[in-house]
Image (cartoon, grey):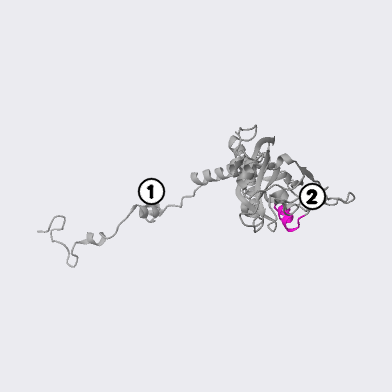
Amino acid sequence: MGGPGEPPEGAPEGTPGGGEDEYRSVVFDESFVRAARLQEYSAEERIADHAPAVRRRPPVRRTGLPRQALALVLLIALAFGTAIYMGVRHPYQNPAARRAVEPLRMTVIPLAPQGAVPGTADPAHLFAHSPAAQYRVGAEGIPLPPSRRTAHFSDSQVVTALSTAKDYIVRSSLYPEVLTGQQVRPVRMLLDPAQLDQFDESFTHPAADGRHAPTGWLVRFDPARAELADRGIRVQGTLQAAEADAATLEVTADHTFVYALRPAGADAGTPASLFTVRRELQFRFDRDDLRLRQTQLIVSYVQAGPLSCGDDSTNHLRPLLAGQTAGTGGPAGTDPYATGGATALCGSLAASAQPSV
């Protein structure tokens, strides 16, 4: 007997599984069937013509783009049209051009003593018996005032302007390395880049022209003449901030600094004397300056003494020290016919401004 599904006589010899096994390895998957593209002829067609029972279906002709491609084309066209429209309409205003930075205008006025400069070996005694007795020491004498927002600047921007101005004053009036002429970089770093050429030229080619005096930018003493007898510099003054216009903040500073000095290279027992510098500075800040914490110094008015009117105070301050007098020398000569030169000025240092020792 043959097994189920086999002919009665059994499977043919030589074919272990029968004829069906020949097609068991053939797999007609879905992609193969779709790719065949076959179509059966009708009965009438088969009677009329002895053609194969099937005919090849003509390839499907697609009309138009797929929906995804069409949507992509429309989206690109819409974006392109929007870009052109926005460019024509200029919906955003161009930022206002930055105002030109003004060069620093400076005046340095030496104050000559009316007699011999008083002095003593104890700097603390000098301070205690001078108008600076109640002054604070160092940066504590430069407090920041209460700040309020303005019409176009926030409270934080006003604070930034005040603190940057204070930083400039501290570096240019209190740093020992600046006072002794060893460094100018701490001050230079705070300036707007548009003023750096003027600053650098002031130190490479000092001139009493109201534009290029190093002593208009900072306080520094002639290291060959004087040195600090006490690092506790006394300071008193004010800071005020105000809006100049919608794009500019201005800070006005007015401070008096009192230094105890003695001759360069002298020992601690050598009498010291006091030297007074009053600095009135005007700072300007635009929004770039506030963001970068830098400033424009546009006005510097300095009175300093005791000095001799005959000495040049352009590059360094050359103090008159304990026991010295101004002598008979007057201010440096001024040529009224020369253009571009500043008129030399000299004042008298009141006796009340000196310590009573």
Tell which of 169 and 259 is nearer to you.
259
- Which quarter of the picture shows residue 139? top right
Amino acid under disc 2: Cys
Q: Which mark is residue 118?
A: none
The C terminus lies in which quarter of the figure?
A: top right
Left or right? Give the position of 29 relative to 65: left
Name the residue furthest right.
337
Q: Is residue 288 above or below residue 314?
A: above
Q: In this rendering, is residue 144 above or below 345?
A: above
Residue with the mark numbered 2: 309
Q: Which residue is mark 1?
A: 42
| Magenta stretch secondary structure, dominant | helix
Across and down, in percent, residue 39 comes to 39, 51
Near-viewer residue (310 or 265): 265
Tag 2 and tag 1, C-beta contact below 8 Å? no
Between residue 241 and residue 276, name the one nearer to us. 276
User: How many neighbours does mark 2 have within 10 angstroms: few (below 14), some (14-19), or many (20 or more)?
Assistant: many
Q: Quadrant of the N terminus?
A: bottom left
Q: Magenta includes 12?
A: no
Please identify the quarter of the rendering in which residue 237 is found.
Answer: top right
Q: Secondary structure at mark 1?
A: loop
Residue 247 x, y percent position in the rendering? 68, 38
Residue 44 in sight here: yes
What's the CA distance linking mark 2 and mark 1?
126 Å
Stretch in magenta: 196-206
Is 60 left, or right, of 104 in this rendering? left
Residue 3, image quadrant: bottom left
Point out the tag, 2 or 1, that comes first from the N-terminus: 1
Question: Type of residue at label 1?
Answer: Ser
Image vertical order of residue 251 relative to residue 190, above or below:
above
Q: Nearer the viewer, residue 322 or 145?
A: 322
Is residue 66 something one can see in this rendering?
no
